[in-house]
Image (cartoon, grey):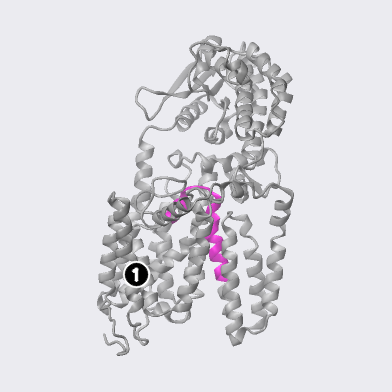
Amino acid sequence: MKYNSKYDFKVPYNPWGFFVFFSVINILLTYFDLPLDAKIWTVFLGLVIPLFLILAAPPAPPGKQPSFFATPRAAASFPVSTGFLILFWAAAVVPRFWKLGSPDRWQGGDPVQYGFYAVEFLHHWTWKFFETFGQTPSLVSYFCCFFLKITGDPFVSIQLPGAVISLLTLTAGYSAARQFFPKFPSRIFLFLLAFNYWSFDLAAYLLPGDLLPLWEFICFYILGRWLNSEKQNHAWFWAGLLGFALGLGPFTFTAWPVLVPVIFIILFYRFGFSPALKNPAPLLGFISVFIISLAPFGWASWGGDFGGHLSKIGIWNDFSVYKFFSLFTRYISVLFWGGSEGQSIPPAGGFLNFFYGSLSFLGIIALLRRRQKLTLALLALSFILFSLPGILSNTLEGHRVLLLFPLLFLLCAAGIESLAAFSPPRRQTAVLLLLLFPPGAIDIARFYIPREAAHAAVLDENRRSYGILKSLSEEQGPGLIFPDLIASTHDYSLFYYTYFFNAALNPDLPAEKAAWCAVFTENHYQPFLAGEFPDSRWIAFPTEKEDVLSRHVLGLIPVTRENRARLLRWRDFYEFIYRTHYQILDLPNGKARRPILENLLEFHPRVPEDPFLQSCYFEKLVFNYSWEKTFHPEDDGTVWNNFSPVLRRSLEKGYRDVVLCEKFGRLFPRRLASSRRPCAGTPKTIF
């Protein structure tokens, strides 16, 4: 290859050599436990130095640019048959719909919170813009509610939306790529979108972040249609539609604002330098529609408590340079090499496995060699902006940087095409197969094999309880199920998955005809309840530690003529507990629990004269009072004299064991606690 003689420094370019080199570097950083200084030197020598060497070298000859840099309307370099497209979409659909509707795709924790809201919407339909502790958009809860109403299957309702959104993301991603790139690189991009860990993760769990890449692709598709419009009336239409679509960002996830400046920068650049886009009227129309479409978000933010969670998780809380740098490096690591801490992050290999990571670095090399200054500047700016929701927070959360998802795979597509262009024409098809299928297979194995192994291992207590209760409902019909009679819960999976055979909560089921009852509660209640209901059966749950049982138990109680009235009173009490859980879940981060405490105090006279229910009420009040005193000591709604009489009466009427005595004793003012102990032999763990 000949270079311009004015360059004295020359780097022999072979993309395959760079690809192998990057692969070795990524494998070292992914699968080897290197010391910190070794990791820093590996990144510097293996990734940073090659980029600067290419930048210092002569540019690629101008006449040898692959189709990635051609016009979007260029013909495809590799025609694709209809049979191959059918096989591709079948391969894309199968992993996303695998075991759909099965308990094997159990979702607990954060995803099932949206199922909890869906059940609430079935009971009391209302419109909410924000929900949960983090005040995330509520759209996914309405999706789940819609499918609950249609199918009556909680598993399908919480699993199907993510799978459908994932497939729509593939379609939108290819359509958006075709507005800016020819068919060949767009098809590579589509394949990369279909078979990667990130995409599988979005399809498997129902979370607001699922909507972010889909919305991003829709915005770029409409932007491309606008910029490629040849008629003025078409430009008006696409400009208005882009403003509307961009204004729907608040319905997706809290990271949406960083896409807005990228869209505006592209538009202002094109309108400033393109003679065909000198008419500013469509641009003004776009801005007007965008502002109008933001009105629901603005109204909900103005009248609600939006922003509290963002202010609490910001890195400006207890800021330090070390903390900022540490979090930044962890986000970079989780993209390419994996991580061990945080939420929604993959195992070893990162969101891009070592294969995809090497291809993305090679894509950067391809752009540098061709001196695509504008493209590089836009990509660098987009990378910085799309990373801000993550690096400006104080914790690691994969969904905060989801907007990087298309950007990284666009670089992968550029890397693949540079390898294909450097290969002999007769071998290019084999090269493409070699570059596309192995990394896709690696990510299928990375995502699904650990999930299957986890399902075969010891199940968590909620899922084990569901299996027992489901079998019982198939034999004896719906029962009275009280899934969360515990002091505090952050997993509503048992509540959600048992809803359609839970006569204690579902108004469509006759509670009076229930033949059995189940209660999921603290294990220290088992001796008392076993004595109250001699025919009951109790199931304890193992934990990860050997010979250590969970603090929760599941009790199965036959409903008889003698205990039916008592258990129906439990149903009325549980209705209040359910409302309290909903109120806690919907309380924005940073807000005091004063309304919850007031409701608990107001409800006390209506608590049935049942020792178990009195004790459950006592624990619920103690936990929320302690929470408020710990996290909101400034709240004047936690005056001890207002709570002490209620707590004493509940304790006296309830099942007084050492655990409840300990909890009550620790609430006494310090001057009393230092002088006497309320109980002897109390355990160290309270909640």
Left or right: 75 in relation to 269: left
In the figure, residue 652 lies in which quadrant?
A: top right
The relative height of residue 258 versus residue 589 in the rendered view (above or below) is: below
Residue 506 in view (yes/no): no
> Is 209 a magenta residue?
yes
Percent across and percent down for residue 488 are 56, 29
Q: Is residue 162 above or below residue 236?
A: above
Q: Position of residue 446 (x, y in %)?
A: 35, 50
Badge count? 1
Q: Residue 637: x, y in percent? A: 71, 30
Residue occupying image coordinates x 32% and y 68%: 49
Element at label 1: helix
Residue at 51% from the left image edge and 20% from the top image edge: 555
Q: Nearer the viewer, residue 274 or 440?
A: 274
Indicate the amino acid at tag 1: Leu
- Residue 295 is at least partly visible in this image: yes
Which quadrant is home to the N terminus?
A: bottom left
239 lies above or below 335: below
Membership of 204 in magenta stretch? yes
The answer to which image quadrant residue 45 occupies is bottom left
Closer to us: 675 or 576: 675
Q: Is residue 106 left or right of residue 479?
A: left
Query: Would you name the residue on which mark 1 appears?
Result: 362
175, 315: nearer the viewer? 315
Please tell me whether the stretch drawn in magenta is mainly helix, strand or loop.
helix
Q: Nearer the viewer, residue 262 or 315?
A: 315
Residue drawn at point x = 59 percent, y = 49 percent: 140
Residues shaded magenta: 198-222
> Residue 294, image x and y in percent?
69, 61
The residue positioned farthest toward the bottom in the image shown: 5
Neighbours of disc 1 within 10 Å: few (<14), some (14-19), many (20+): many
Residue 586 in the image: above or below residue 17: above
